[in-house]
Image: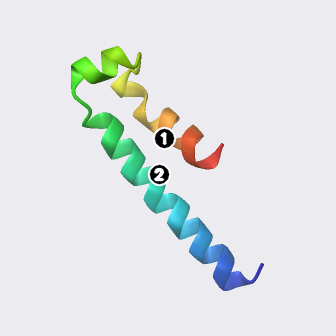
Amino acid sequence: MTLIDSIRTTLHKRAVYYKTRKEIESMPLDVALDLDIDRQDADRIARHAVYG
């Protein structure tokens, strides 16, 4: 993997992380409760979803 590919991958993962976190934080309460998700844990959930 070249340096450019590594940077591109890192930037893509970061963008997906931010989008995922924002989606979880803005999720309606009834949907979050149905999915058993605490919106306060959006950071942890998004980090685990994107970075493993």
Q: What is the quadrant of residue 40 in the picture?
A: top left
Q: Which residue is mark 1?
A: 46
Mark 1 surroundings: few (<14), some (14-19) or many (≥20) residues within 10 A: many
Counting other residues with Cα less than 10 Å from the Cα at mark 2, is it few (<14), some (14-19), or many (20 or more)? many
The reply to whether discs 2 and 1 touch (Cβ–Cβ < 8 Å) is yes
Label 1's element?
helix
Q: According to the image, label 2 marks what residue? A: 17
Look at label 1 and name its amino acid: Ala
Q: Is residue 31 left or right of residue 35?
A: left
Q: Position of residue 6 (x, y in %)?
A: 67, 74
Q: Real-space Cα distance between discs 2 and 1?
A: 6 Å
Q: Residue 5, percent across and down?
A: 66, 79
Quadrant into which the N terminus falls: bottom right
Three-letter amino acid code at disc 2?
Answer: Tyr
Q: Quadrant for residue 33, please give it.
A: top left
Q: Position of residue 21 (x, y in %)?
A: 39, 43
Residue at (32, 45) in percent of width and height: 22
Image point (41%, 34%), residue name: 42
Question: Is residue 12 positioned above or below 26 on the image?
Answer: below
Q: Is residue 41 rendered to the left or right of residue 5?
A: left
- Residue occupying image coordinates x 40% and y 21%: 37
* On screen, residue 4 above or below 52: below
Residue 32: give its label: none
Q: How is the image coloured?
A: rainbow
Q: Secondary structure at mark 2?
A: helix
Q: Nearer the N terminus, badge 2 or badge 1?
A: 2
